[in-house]
Image (tube, rainbow, N blue to C red):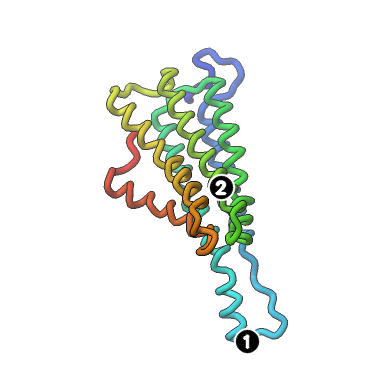
């Protein structure tokens, strides 16, 4: 089977779309693994059962940030995988969209550590949501470019429109989470509650079906 090509047939650079997919898989594997570094075993001078329970309780924000970020990265990876099942070739624009996209993917561990440690403050939550918004928008742009540039296999117009709508779901939820941060009562109850917006993803998927490609 001939590899998917970048820059079209006859490309002499030796780069193909499979190399892009391999790079994506590698970056995601590293980013998802690094997330666990935000969780450290508590150091307790005179450990007791009560002290250990309290230490684990204090880790809940970090554990939540880890789990949420891990699952979101898994969803983004899955979406990219679905896209490349359809993408038959790549051009320079698609390549650089993916590179910039991976830049923000690799930033997620930092965003997760930041919000895990300082989730009661506004800035870490804004930073986290902006990071995810950038990933979602770039993934959408990648797919739109692939469709508009004829880089995919044959798809009817309805399927194209449906797939574009599916790709807007994640950035829309990031925008919702960002908007929640600025509600007046969030300062009192905690800015971290805004991240509950991401729990809408499985609900929306349940009622709208799987991501359409």
The location of residue 173, given as percent across then percent down, is 43, 45
Of 131 and 124, the residue lying toward us: 124
Q: Is residue 136 left or right of residue 209?
A: right
Tell me residue 80's x, y (percent).
46, 37
Using the numbered discs, state the Cα–Cα distance from disc 2 to disc 1 in whole angstroms: 37 Å
Residue 101 locus on image (x, y percent): 56, 35
Question: Up-down: is 137 above or below 174?
Answer: above
Q: Residues within 10 Å of mark 1 (few under 14, many from 20)?
A: few
Numbered circle sitting on residue 113: none
- The residue at the point 56 percent across, 15 percent down is 11
Classify mark 2: helix, strand or loop: helix
| Lateral position of residue 85 relative to residue 207, left or right | right
Q: x%, y% of residue 83? A: 42, 33
Q: Residues within 10 Å of mark 2 (few under 14, many from 20)?
A: some
Q: Describe residue 81's horizontal placement relative to residue 161 as left or right.
A: right
Does residue 67 appear anywhere in the picture?
no
Mark 2 or 1, nearer chain start:
2
Q: Answer above or below: position of 156 versus 213.
A: above
The quadrant of the picture occupied by the C terminus is top left
**Residue visible at 53% across and 13% down in the picture:** 10
Residue at 27% across, 47% down: 207
Which residue is label 1 attached to? 48
């Amino acid at each position: 089977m001939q590899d998917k090509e970048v820059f079209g047939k006859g490309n002499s650079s030796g780069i193909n779309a499979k190399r892009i997919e391999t790079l994506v898989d590698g970056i995601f594997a590293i980013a998802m693994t690094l997330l666990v570094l935000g969780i450290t075993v508590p150091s307790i001078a005179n450990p007791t059962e009560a002290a250990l329970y309290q230490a684990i309780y204090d880790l809940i924000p970090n554990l939540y940030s880890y789990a949420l970020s891990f699952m979101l990265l898994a969803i983004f990876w899955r979406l990219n995988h679905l896209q490349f099942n359809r993408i038959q070739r790549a051009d320079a624009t698609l390549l650089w969209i993916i590179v910039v996209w991976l830049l923000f993917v690799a930033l997620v561990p930092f965003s997760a550590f930041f919000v895990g440690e300082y989730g009661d403050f506004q800035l870490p939550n804004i930073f986290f949501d902006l990071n995810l918004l950038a990933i979602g928008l770039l993934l959408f742009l990648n797919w739109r470019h692939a469709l508009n540039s004829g880089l995919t296999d044959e798809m009817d117009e309805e399927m194209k429109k449906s797939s574009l709508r599916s790709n807007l779901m994640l950035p829309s939820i990031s925008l919702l989470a960002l908007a929640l941060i600025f509600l007046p009562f969030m300062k009192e109850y905690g800015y971290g509650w805004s991240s509950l917006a991401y729990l809408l993803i499985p609900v929306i998927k349940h009622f709208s079906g799987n991501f359409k490609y």
